[in-house]
Amino acid sequence: MRAGLRLGGFLQALGWHDQLLGAVHAALIITEAFGGPAFTAGTPITLNGHPAYLQEGPTPDHVDFRSLTWSDGPKNYFVYWSGPESGQLSHEDFLKVAENLS
């Protein structure tokens, strides 16, 4: 879980905060990669019959995030969403996005 928290902090640091306006913008990141180790931090779940790992929560500055990783053989998938609590992507909708990828 520790690596996932560092990854979430790194992605947050990439600039989703608009320092001039003080606003937080939502972002959805989807990656698909061939080979390499599967990322296994988080709560184990099943996604389309594949073992997957889910992380959810607010960051210290009240920005919600969700991340999901899984492998379907040669491909590794990573879906990450982050946004303000007021513009939340629901847990169910987040999973629907992931389910449609594999």
Image (spheres, grey):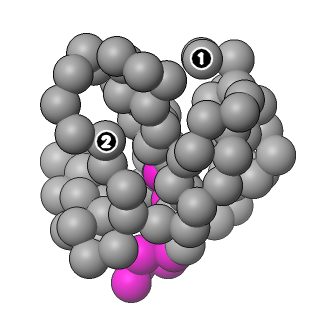
Pick the residue in front: 100 or 75: 75
How many angstroms separate mark 1 from mark 2 (CA)? 16 Å
| Residue underneath mark 2 | 38
Which one is in front, 45 or 25?
45
Residue 85 makes an appearance in the image:
yes
Q: Secondary structure at mark 1?
A: loop
Could you say which quadrant of the image residue 74 lies in?
A: top left
**In the foreground, 38 or 18:** 38
- Residue 61 numbered mark, or none: none
Q: Position of residue 95 (x, y in %)?
A: 71, 40
Mark 1 or mark 2, whichever is nearer to me: 2
Q: Extreme right residue here?
A: 92
Which residue is rendered at x = 75% and y = 53% of the image?
91
Element assignment for label 2: loop
* 84 in relation to 39, above or below: below
- How packed mark 1 is, by other alpha carbons closer than 10 Å (few <14, some 14-19, many 20 or more), is few
Q: Residues within 10 Å of mark 2 (few under 14, many from 20)?
A: some
Residue type, label 1: Leu
Q: Is residue 30 visible?
A: no
Quadrant where the C terminus sits is: top right
How many marks the image carries: the answer is 2
**Looking at this view, is 71 or 96 the one in front?**
71
Q: Residue furthest bottom?
A: 60
Q: Position of residue 1 (x, y in %)?
A: 35, 74
The circle on residue 101 is: 1
| Position of residue 98 measured from the top left corner of the image (x, y, whole percent) | 63, 30
Q: What is the span of residues highlighted in magenta in the rendered image?
A: 58-67
Q: Earlier in the sequence, mark 1 or mark 2?
A: 2
The main secondary structure of the magenta stretch is strand
| Amino acid bearing label 2 | Ala
